[in-house]
Image (spheres, rainbow, N blue to C red):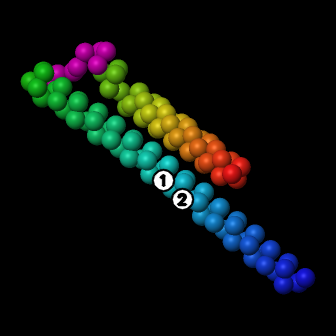
């Protein structure tokens, strides 16, 4: 009986450790994707601003008010956050779809 309790405790500890590792890895991937999206958006803003000043105005003139508003860093941060959360939602939907498909496969397998 004691060996059984020890085995159960070991299994529970291993399962909890694996779950914690999976959560840490998922958080790391989510943070990495967010940082990459943010850096990409900021690089695009810098490129567009430089292109706007160099090519369209042929000098360091100020862009029109609407474009200046569209290229503001706070708006870009908001749009990158929005894009990040939309990607996260898409990932969650794909995960739910995958889980539903696995459940239906398991249910079909156990019925036969």
- Please name the residue shown 23% across and 30% down the image: 48
Rendered view: 16 above or below 95: below
Position of 96 with respect to 91 (left or right) is: right
Name the spot of residue 68 as percent of width and height, x first. 30, 21
Looking at the image, residue 106 lies above or below residue 58: below
Q: Secondary structure at mark 2?
A: helix
Q: Position of residue 100 (x, y in %)?
A: 62, 42
Q: Residue furthest left?
A: 58
* Residue 5, horizontal then vertical, whole percent: 85, 78
Residue located farthest toward the right when viewing the structure as drawn? 1
Magenta stretch: residue 64 in it?
A: yes
Q: Which corner quadrant holds the N terminus?
A: bottom right
Counting other residues with Cα less than 10 Å from the Cα at mark 2, is it few (<14), some (14-19), or many (20 or more)? few
| Residue 38 falls within the magenta-colored stretch | no
- Mark 2 vs mark 1, CA separation in Å: 6 Å
Residue 30 visible in the shown view: yes
**First to last magenta residue range:** 59-67
Is 81 above or below relative to 10? above
| Residue 77 locus on image (x, y percent) | 42, 34
Residue 25: assigned label: 2
Question: Foreground: 5 or 47?
Answer: 5
Task: Please identify the dominant SS of the magenta region.
Answer: loop
Give the label on residue 1, or none: none
What's the residue at 69%, 67% (across, down)? 15
**Callout 1: SS:** helix
Q: Could you tell whether 64 is left or right of 56 in the image?
A: right
Identify the residue under disc 1: 29
Q: In percent of the image, x 29 and y 33: which residue is there?
A: 45
Above or below, 42 relative to 72 = below
Tell me whether the residue at label 2 lies in contact with that at label 1, contact meaning CB atoms closer than 8 angstroms. yes
């Amino acid at each position: 009986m004691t060996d059984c309790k020890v085995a159960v405790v070991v299994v529970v500890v291993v399962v909890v450790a694996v779950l914690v590792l999976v959560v840490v890895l998922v958080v790391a991937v989510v943070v990495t994707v967010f940082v990459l999206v943010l850096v990409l958006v900021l690089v695009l803003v810098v490129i567009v601003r430089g292109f706007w000043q160099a090519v369209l105005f042929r000098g360091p003139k100020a862009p029109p008010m609407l474009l200046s508003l569209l290229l503001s860093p706070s708006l870009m941060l908001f749009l990158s956050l929005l894009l990040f959360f939309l990607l996260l939602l898409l990932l969650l939907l794909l995960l739910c779809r995958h889980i539903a498909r696995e459940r239906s496969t398991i249910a079909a397998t156990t019925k036969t």
